[in-house]
């Protein structure tokens, strides 16, 4: 059975977000990634599989090693989806701040 992974379900997990942060700066092998966590390597491998299926990570084989690196285009798509929500909340907080300043001045 081939499950379609959802990007937002993938990044909802704190371990997967931590993996993305690790790999964002440079490519890493699964072993190097796993050494940053106190979980079993198969658990980290499952996280890597999910991130790869969502296309947030890509793989490149070099000899016997598989290196994982961030898919910047996919991360950009996620950021573009989130941007209107960020703007909406910034506007709301700015309005709240102006109301609070007005309230304090009275």
Image: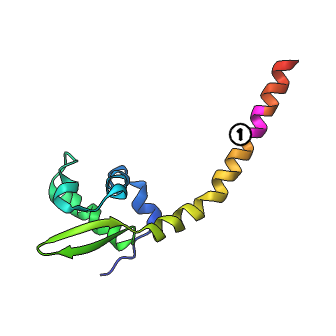
Residue 22 point in image, percent of width and height: 32, 53
Q: How many marks?
A: 1
In which quarter of the view is residue 85 placed? bottom right
Q: Nearer the viewer, residue 43 or 21?
A: 21
Q: Residue furthest left?
A: 64
Residue 19 point in image, percent of width and height: 32, 55
Apparent side of residue 94 relative to residue 33 in the rendered image (left or right): right
Residue 6 point in image, percent of width and height: 44, 69
Apparent side of residue 39 relative to residue 84 in the rendered image (left or right): left
Name the residue rendered at 67%, 58% in the picture: 84
Apparent side of residue 62 relative to residue 89 in the rendered image (left or right): left
| Quarter the N terminus occupies | bottom left
Name the residue rendered at 35%, 76% in the picture: 3
Name the residue rendered at 23%, 67% in the picture: 67
| Quarter the C terminus occupies | top right
User: Is-magenta flag for residue 49?
Assistant: no
Q: Is residue 65 above or below residue 16?
A: below
In which quarter of the view is residue 59 placed? bottom left
Q: Which residue is mark 1?
A: 93
Q: Which residues are magenta?
A: 93-97
Magenta span: predominant SS is helix
Apparent side of residue 12 relative to residue 35 in the rendered image (left or right): right
Q: Nearer the viewer, residue 40 or 27?
A: 27
Residue 72 point in image, percent of width and height: 44, 67
User: Is-magenta flag for residue 96?
Assistant: yes
Q: Nearer the viewer, residue 6 or 72?
A: 72
Disc 1: CA contacts within 10 A as few (<14), some (14-19) or many (>=20): few
- For the residue labelled by badge 1, is the local secondary structure a helix, a strand or a loop? helix
């Amino acid at each position: 059975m081939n499950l379609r992974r959802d990007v937002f379900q993938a990044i909802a997990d704190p371990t997967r977000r931590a993996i993305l942060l690790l790999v964002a700066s440079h490519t890493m092998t699964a072993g190097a990634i796993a050494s940053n966590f106190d979980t079993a390597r198969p658990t980290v491998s499952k996280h890597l599989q999910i991130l790869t299926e969502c296309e947030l990570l890509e793989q490149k084989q070099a000899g016997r090693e598989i290196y994982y690196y961030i898919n910047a285009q996919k991360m950009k798509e996620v950021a573009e989806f989130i941007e209107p929500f960020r703007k909406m909340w910034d506007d709301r907080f700015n309005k709240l701040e102006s109301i609070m300043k007005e309230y304090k001045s009275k």
